[in-house]
Image: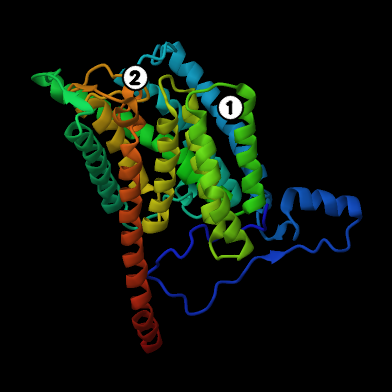
Amino acid sequence: MEPENEHPLPEVPSAEIAVEPAPQPQFASVDQDPAETRFILWLFFGNQGPRAGWSVLKSLRAGWSVLVFLVLFILFAGGIGFTFFHFHLVSGKGGFTASETFFGDLISVLAMAGTTAIIALIERRRGNLLAFNLLDSHVVFNFVFGLVAGFAALSALIGALAWGGWLHFGPVALSGAGILKFGALWGAAFLVVGFSEEGMFRCYLQFTLTRGINFWWALGVIALICGELLWRGKGNGIWGIFIVAGLGLIPCLLLQLFKTPGAGFWQAAWVTSTLFGFVHTGNHGENWIGIFAAAFVGFAFCVSIWATGSAWWAIGCHAAWDWSETYFYGAADSGNVATGHLLTTTPAGSALWSGGADGPEGSVLVIAIVLLMIAGLVVYGRRKHTSASAAVPFAVSEQAAG
């Protein structure tokens, strides 16, 4: 992978202006080492060797850091999962209930928190585990903004399906205290899901791959993903992955060829979004549109990091999207209908438009909704960038006056 880049976001707006550039880390010289030593240093640390004054893990290529992360994560998850199973917090039967969803994803959240805390400590990251795309001076605003956006986007999709006659509403499934009870239970469950999936893909992986990936390494990872799907044979909507892989090919290659600043962020986004779609191929009831939509939404969440400066918007949006689809509207999610939902909806007509058994995420209309979401994030991000740029002369003059 490329030499490490400590600026993970391309053109992220900032209100702080440094008068003097921060000192750059120095590189250890490897020119005088034997050929075998130089090869080992290149293999683990890149062309410039380990960086003097840095921890060993922080100097490692991003790929090796990810490998260390995965080993620690598996160890943590195995221990926590065994404990949860022993105390009957998870059954292993895979039922789509609030309890199974909450504790099942809590295993991942706790394992990830422990792993990233250790990684951050070893890498000497400021902010500990928050260093991985969670440092944000506007956490509450961005999180609530994401919650509202997630509910609004899913509601727009449901509304479009109902307007076109591809979804029909049935009777209300809950009453009385059950509405509040299941609303709260599913709210907690999907908040944990948001932290679990965004923490893995948009926090740790997006941050770490950004600092050390280029087009060729990204292409290699994408090729491995597609090769595994081909080797596996028929899967649930694997063509959705192939389409995502193809769509990112030319833009990421151009970013590489023109040496565009911040290219690593978007090449990492290509990888993490494809991986996000890939893990959804294991869900029952998925079609190719549903898999493509998962990857496409993953890319939208990457755009949100660029626009807001952190992953808090993505966490809120993810949680609200799932809660709205599963609990509030009672629609199928990857072919599964939850136990304890408020409204009742049934798909109608062509599966291309209704989503069929997959649910609203399997409808071609979801692509338009995600495009609108991305467009809104780009406009918001551009305005934020413009505001930050406009503040530069004022900030410099204030510091000069001081």
* Residue matched to label 1: 75
Q: Which mark is residue 336?
A: 2
Secondary structure found at label 2: loop
Left or right side of 74 for 101: left
Residue 125: x and y in percent read 53, 53
Residue 373: x and y in percent read 32, 49
Marks counted in the figure total 2
Nearer to me, 376 or 100 = 376
Classify the position of the C terminus by image quarter.
bottom left
Left or right side of 33 for 205: left
Q: Let me know if residue 314 appears in the view.
A: yes
Nearer to me, 326 or 144 = 326
Q: Amino acid at mark 2?
A: Asn
Q: Let me know if residue 114 appears in the view.
A: no
Q: Is residue 21 above or below residue 110?
A: below
**Residue found at the very far left of the displayed protein:** 176
Q: Callout 2: 10 Å neighbours few (<14), some, many (20+)?
A: some
Residue 257: x and y in percent read 63, 62
Q: Is residue 40 above or below residue 52?
A: above
Residue at 57% x, 56% y is 264
Residue at 31% x, 38% y is 365
Q: Callout 1: 10 Å neighbours few (<14), some, many (20+)?
A: few
Q: Is residue 44 above or below residue 325?
A: below
Task: Say whether disc 2 or disc 1 marks the residue closer to the N-terminus.
Answer: 1
Give the foreground label among 2 and 1: 2
Q: Which mark is residue 352?
A: none
Residue 266: x and y in percent read 51, 54
